[in-house]
Image (cartoon, helix red, strand yellow):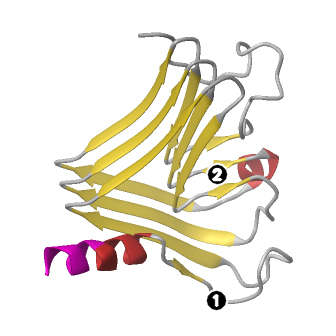
Amino acid sequence: MKALVTVALITMSSLALANGGGGGGGSNPTTQATFLVNTSVMNTSDGMNSASEQNLASNAGNFTSLNTKDQTVDAKDSYILNESKRGGLATQNIASNAGTAGLYSTTTQVAVITGSTVINKASWGAQATQNISSNSNCITCLNSSSSHGHGHGHGHGD
């Protein structure tokens, strides 16, 4: 029974309630909601140029800035991990937008995280970028020859 409940929670955590059309126009904005209770969400990468990108109630990449109205993550007693090792990149977005369009969006972004652990970790020369209820124009940053100077916090080495 516990396994069934966990599967139901994981399925519910990826819920995006769409009021209309996919990636085009902004006439029908969507609501993105992630609800986690007693759940683990883990994403890892290992090796040079590997990438670990985790998005919860978030937009990343090419999207229309008017397409999203509300972004909500509600996590209770949960464990959220995004990790990269040995030269990779860990990017974690929680109720946020990553990409140029995100900088121009006017969304309500709420992350309510109680009794939970949120980790975005980089070790052995890897990089980590994390956005919680915030917007960034840096999606993967792997295309940059320098990991510095784009305004985001980075975790370096263990």
Give the residue number, with chain letter if any, for mark 1.
19
Q: Position of 68 compared to 129: left or right?
A: right
Give the residue number, with chain letter if any, for mark 2.
97
Q: Determine whether 114 is above or below 136 in the image.
A: below
Q: Earlier in the sequence, mark 1 or mark 2?
A: 1
Range covered by the magenta-colored residues: 1-6
- Taking the magenta stretch, the answer to whether it contains residue 151 is no
Q: Determine whether 28 is above or below 114 in the image.
A: below
Split into 4 quadrants, where in the image is the C terminus? top left
Q: Position of 89 compared to 33: left or right?
A: right
* Residue name at image x 63 percent, y 19 percent: 87
Q: Residues within 10 Å of mark 2 (few under 14, many from 20)?
A: many
- Taking the magenta stretch, the answer to whether it contains residue 2 is yes
Q: Main secondary structure of the magenta part?
A: helix
Query: Which is more toward the observer, 29 or 9?
Result: 9
* Residue name at image x 63 percent, y 78 percent: 30
Q: Amino acid at mark 1?
A: Asn
* Residue name at image x 40 percent, y 70 percent: 13
Report x, y in % for residue 23: 80, 74
